[in-house]
Amino acid sequence: MNIPTNHPRRASLEQRHALEKGLNQGIVTPTGMIAFGRGEAFDYLLGEKTTNNAQKACRAAAAMLLLSRHAVLSVNGNTAMLCAKNVIRLAQTTGAQIEANVFYPPVKKRRALIARHFEKLGKKILGKNTSKKIPGLASNRSLVEEKGIFSADTVLVMVEDGDRTQALRKTGKKIVAIDLNPKSRTAIAAHVTIVDNVVRAVPEIARHAQKLRNKNTEELEKIVAAFDNGKSLKEALAFMKKRA
Ligand code: ATP
């Protein structure tokens, strides 16, 4: 598909196109396309730009990832197709692992396809050898790798279902979320939520992480402590209401 460079909705059309490609490859599911459409509506209200509010959340997320002993960036079909290269960059900047973790079937096959997608970009990721379960989640959607999400102290989730975010939070892990809907269960359950499109937020967290990497633990802890997720979500919603 050729999208004119000056098309006003170029970024959004490129994302749609990437997901359609993922759908044909079996990486993205029809439900993923619906979730994308929900996100697009919220992105429209944001003006398809990273707000100051999201910037602050990206900085807190970067500090949280840098403070972690073992952080894992959880990727699903949508995020693999939308921002794999930037997820790899974020993993490199923060020392985090990447794990394929999907909600909708065929779970095993899609995890393998996502891992192959990252391998083609030069990055080996986790998600194929799942022997552990996230407690409180039914079915094989709860399966995770022992040396990945299961033992992580911090997990970054994006375009994630609320059930899983809530179950992950209950295990005592720190949760960073990227979700365009400030009212979603994922946005509310996370410790740090970035209300922004993954396409813009992931490179933005990496940029902050690059700037914060030489800060000491105390300085990073101060950044995290100063962040109030409830207040930040209210600000994001107020921004959208003003534009609606
Ligand atoms: P919840 O279960 O958390 O209450 P939900 O039922 O909408 O919310 P999903 O269907 O799994 O959960 O949706 C994933 C979430 O991801 C939605 O809130 C959607 O707005 C958001 N989303 C979709 N596309 C993007 C994107 N490109 N960047 C960031 N967030 C997105």
Image (spheres, helix red, strand yellow):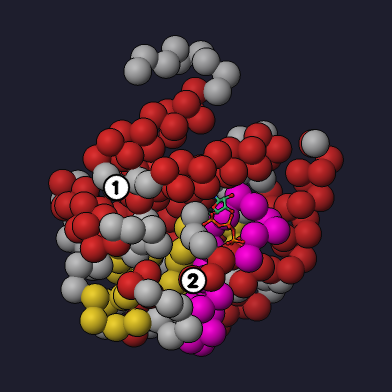
Residue range corresponding to the magenta coloring: 165-185
**Mark 1 falls on what kind of element?**
loop
| Point 70% across, 38% down: residue | 45
- Distance in Å between CA atoms under marks 2 and 1: 19 Å
Quick check: is the Cβ at mark 2 less than 8 Å away from ligand 1?
no
Closer to us: 58 or 179: 179
For label 2, the residue is 164
Indicate left or right for 35 with 73 as reference: right
Residue located 58% across and 44% down the image: 39
Residue 185 spot, x, y in % from top left: 63, 65
Tell me if residue 171 is in the magenta stretch. yes
Please tell me which residue lies in front, 125 or 49.
Answer: 125
- Tell me if residue 50 comes above or below residue 234 in the rendering: above
Res. 16 in view: yes
Q: Where does the image place residue 41, in percent across and percent down from the top left?
A: 64, 38
Type of the residue with mark 2: Arg
Instruction: Give the number of marks.
Output: 2
Kind of element beneath mark 2: helix
Query: What residue is drawn where x is 54% and y is 84%?
Result: 170
Label 1 packing within 10 angstroms: few (<14), some (14-19), many (20+): many
Q: Does label 2 or label 1 sit earlier along the sequence?
A: 1
Quadrant for the C terminus in the image: top right
Quarter of the N terminus within the rendering: top left
Left or right: 234, with 131 as reference point: right
Q: Nearer the viewer, residue 225 or 2?
A: 2
Tell me which amino acid carries mark 1: Ile
Residue 66 counted in the magenta span: no
| Residue 174: x %, y % from top left | 51, 78
Q: Quadrant of residue 40?
A: top right
Q: Which mark is residue 27?
A: 1
The one of 243 and 159 positioned closer to us in this rendering: 159
Residue 58: image location, x then y, percent: 56, 58
